[in-house]
Amino acid sequence: MTGYLGQLVSLDGPLPASQTLAAQEAFTTLLASALKGETLERQRADAIPGSVLRQRVLSFIEQNFQSGDVTPEAIQRRFNVSRAHLYRAFAADGGVAKLVQGKRLDAAFLELLKSGKSSRSITDIAFSMGFSSGNQLLRSFRARFGMTPSEARNEGGTPPVTRPHAHDVQTHFAEVHRRTVQAEPVER
């Protein structure tokens, strides 16, 4: 694991987000394997196909979540996977539909704060974020944030706290590697 972290630290620059997530997944697989006492081959057989699919789907969602066409069914067709396989890959997120809706709601919240009390209508923002109507945005927004889109726009509100993105993982790995190297006894 130290060698893996060393290789990550030695890279010339930061990894793109999709590669950073894959590096994080690989490190997690190594760590889980070591803690469970399982062979790496066994972990790879179980974890890698799902993590690769997850990375590809996450990249697709990130680039296209504002499109109303990003649905679990569309993702299944695009990536040629079963509903069950897709759900397993995103079970920790409550499913792929919930993940997409969360991204849309977070983006809508930020757009409401950015647009201020005038300019774009809430319905226009709803459509631009992939919601089928202003009412759909209203119901989902209220359920997630405890306020309406109008209240968020007029009162300011606090932007949503989203899960940390993996772009900081390389920095985290560098720090872990530094501490590990410092903690190793020096041979005399």
Image: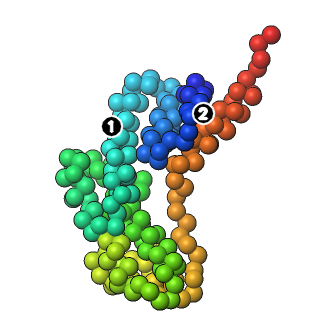
Q: Quadrant of the N terminus?
A: top right
As drawn, 152 above or below 96: below
Q: Which mark is residue 9?
A: 2
**Residue 104, relative to residue 58: is it above or below?**
below
Q: Position of residue 93 (x, y in %)?
A: 41, 57
Q: Nearer the viewer, mark 2 or mark 1?
A: 2
Q: Secondary structure at mark 2?
A: helix
Nearest to the observer: residue 19 or residue 144: 19
Q: Is residue 180 above or below residue 54?
A: above
Q: What is the CA distance from the residue labelled 2 to the residue labelled 1?
A: 26 Å
**Rendered residue at 38%/79% (across/down):** 125
Q: Quadrant of residue 95?
A: bottom left
What is the crowding at mark 1: few (fewer than 14 residues within 10 Å), some, or many (at least 20)?
A: few
The reply, left or right, for residue 77 in relation to residue 30 is left
Residue at image point 54% right, 88% down: 154
- Image point (24%, 48%), residue name: 79
Q: Is residue 157 left or right of residue 63?
A: right
Q: Residue farthest to the right? A: 188
The amino acid on which the numbered mark 1 sits, given as a three-letter code, is: Pro
Pick whichever, 66 or 97, lies toward us. Answer: 66
Residue at position x 39%, y 27% in the image: 42
Q: Quadrant of residue 70?
A: bottom left
Q: Earlier in the sequence, mark 2 or mark 1?
A: 2
Q: Secondary structure at mark 1?
A: helix
Q: Is residue 188 visible?
A: yes
For the residues labelled 2 and 1, say whether their Cβ atoms are less than 8 Å apart.
no
Q: What amino acid is labelled 2 in the image? A: Val
- Quarter of the image for residue 188 reads top right
The residue indicated by pointer 1 is 49
